[in-house]
Image (tube, helix red, strand yellow):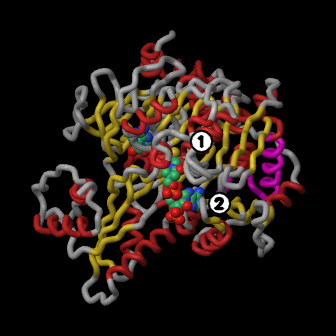
Amino acid sequence: MSNFKDIYNQSINNPENFWQDISNDVFWFKKPTKILDKSNPPFYKWFSDGVTNTCYNALDVHIDNGKGQKTALIYDSPITGQKLKFTYEELRSKVSKFAGGLKEQGVNKGDRVIIYMPMIPEAVIAMLACARIGAIHSVVFGGFASDELASRIDDSTAKILVTASCGFEPGRTVEYKPLVDEALKKAKHKIEKLILFQRKDHEVKLSSSNELDWQEVVSKAKDVDCVEMNSNDLAYILYTSGTTGTPKGIVRDIGGHIVALKWTMKNIYNIDEDDVWWSASDIGWIVGHSYIVYAPLFKGCTTVLFEGKPVGTPDAGVFWKIISEHNVKALFTAPTAFRAIKKEDPEGKFFSKHDLSKFKTLFLAGERADPDTIKWAENLLKVPVIDHWWQTETSWAISANCIGIEMMKTKYGSACKAVPGYDVKIIKPDQSLAKPNEMGDIVVKLPLPPGTFPTLWNADNRYKENYMSNYEGYYQTYDAGHIDEDGYIWIMSRTDDIINVAGHRLSTGAIEEVLSEHQSVAECAVLGIADKLKGQLPIGLIVLKAGVDKDNETISKECIQMVRNKIGPVAAFKVVIVVKRLPKTRSGKILRGTIRKIADNVEYKMPATIDDPKILDEIKVSLKENNIIQNA
Ligand code: COA
Ligand code: AMP
């Protein structure tokens, strides 16, 4: 078997053989004999009698194989000036100590640990320490506010919360402790202990016996070994935006995650054990989980942990500096990072100062990669630039150019072909399968491959109803698009109210829920409008209750602040416009899609079911007055 087509066909025609072969490449305490349990669809189980451990596969196995002195992790923080390197042995030593510390604080197999931390090595250590003792981690992105943290504490009923004294954003120090204190006050569930890592020169006071200093926990702790875990035990919960304000707890089981992610490093990314790999994301997102931490460590290569931004830390040359200094072979980031660099340094002046001879490929994902940005990056870097498509739900790419198998040609605007393991189809509104180039909902035939989500945390029904019911036998991705005659997948839009802001997945429904809580707001609509830098940006339209005597500007400011306080700065929610009425269908549904098209200045049809077409004209005027209509 040598070419992509053969490998792909085998993965679809005989998935059990395909994944069994691949599973031989990972460490098992007990090798699985049952490869796929299909007895209770849509709840499929991979490798159900296998016994393994995530941390063993990330660290110990490489030390057993004589690679203990190899660099596992490079921490480079242009924001603080700190750089550190950890060999596999050094990282294991730190992980096993912290794992011992967690155990001494009463954390056992299956207990949940929330990790709310900036991009520092201790965040990775905490994740791997959980894996070592079989605890389930739930990492919460640092840009979320305390309400979001509180809802994750409640839903996961975590035992311990691990945090740091602060994070650094350009021009701003993010004080975690007050955010954590506020979240703990708001959460109904009470965590037992908080462990805080004190960052140099930014120590904070710990105020009760339940608040522990990381160093103290570690100094008293004993090293612990990896516990044996069933393949279908859970590695982590990662909450992601759903259609309501209640986030969905995407869970990952252990065996399939190790098997699939390790395979992707060579087959999708063409990374071997001696390579240096860099994913410029954040551990709070799925890209960070899979490609800063797990996949590169399963592979046994070197991973870069970067605490900074593509621009402003200190300049638009920082990516090139990191790549050349650490001999990075491939970088994975979101298109928005490249748009930011292109905006600051369109001529690539910073680029020419660095030697990037070891750099071979740029991978982009998280949002649609616009052809302009891809071409700009290709031109500058003179290496292939690969757009690939995936979701928190899957943890690895659904479609990509699998360059470790066979390099395919680029079609600008397409995220290339379905990756082995994923049988991707397009279903039209009449529920029939689409022909090539016909638009529809993008679905994946069940069973999904290993490493994808087997269910939602404590929400089997939500899993079944939300993802597996609209199209029987298929997983509904909530992305729409088409597949062309060569099998290339074109992702065009989301079919729900999820928007993508700088590669960050947000729910407009969740923002609407916050706006509705403002006492002057009668009703509201939030939509994602096109933005040259961030891909999309949310804007809010609000209708005030009768008799409100506050001025519009004050109310708008209050709404913006509420979203920042409740969801977090990451929502980048900066525009609220007061309107008289919202356009609706006769059955009362707000016409968000039509408003978005007006704002984006693209063609739209007057919806046949519109209640009062005049309202759309009023909205157009308001959007124009507020300079929202693109290129108007
Ligand atoms: N902790 C606390 N706050 C955070 C944060 C974190 N980990 N990450 C972002 N924020 C804050 C920012 O400080 C900013 O706050 P502000 O309103 O006070 O300025 C806000 O959230 C929005 O941040 P961001 O989306 O990063 O926008 P930006 O304008 O600061 O930077 C880019 C724009 C393009 C440089 C930036 O989005 C970027 O680097 N993107 C890379 C893509 C990426 O990592 N995607 C993840 C998925 S792959
Ligand atoms: P997340 O779960 O945060 O990874 O977001 C997943 C969503 O991001 C997908 O459902 C898509 O809508 C979008 N997305 C991710 N990668 C791509 C891509 N390469 N092209 C277009 N959209 C993408």
Structural distance between the alpha carbons of marks 1 and 2: 18 Å
Whether the magenta-drawn stretch holds residue 60 is answered as no
Residue drawn 37% across the image and 49% down it: 465
Q: Is residue 47 left or right of residue 204?
A: left
Whether residue 274 can be seen here? yes
Percent coordinates x, y for residue 551 in the rendering: 33, 85
Residue drawn 47% across the image and 35% down it: 377
* Near-viewer residue (82 or 269): 82
Percent coordinates x, y for residue 572 in the rendering: 45, 62
Mark 2, secondary structure of its residue = strand
Q: What residue type is labelled 1?
A: Phe
Residue drawn 39% across the image and 25% down it: 410
Answer above or below: position of 213 versus 42. below
| Labelled disc at residue 168 | 2
Mark 2, Cα crowd under 10 Å, few <14 / some 14-19 / many 20+, is: some
Q: What residue type is labelled 2?
A: Phe
**Range of magenta residues:** 91-116
Displayed quadrant of residue 436: top left
Displayed quadrant of residue 352: top right
Answer above or below: position of 483 versus 498. above
| Labelled disc at residue 319 | 1
* Near-viewer residue (139 or 237): 139
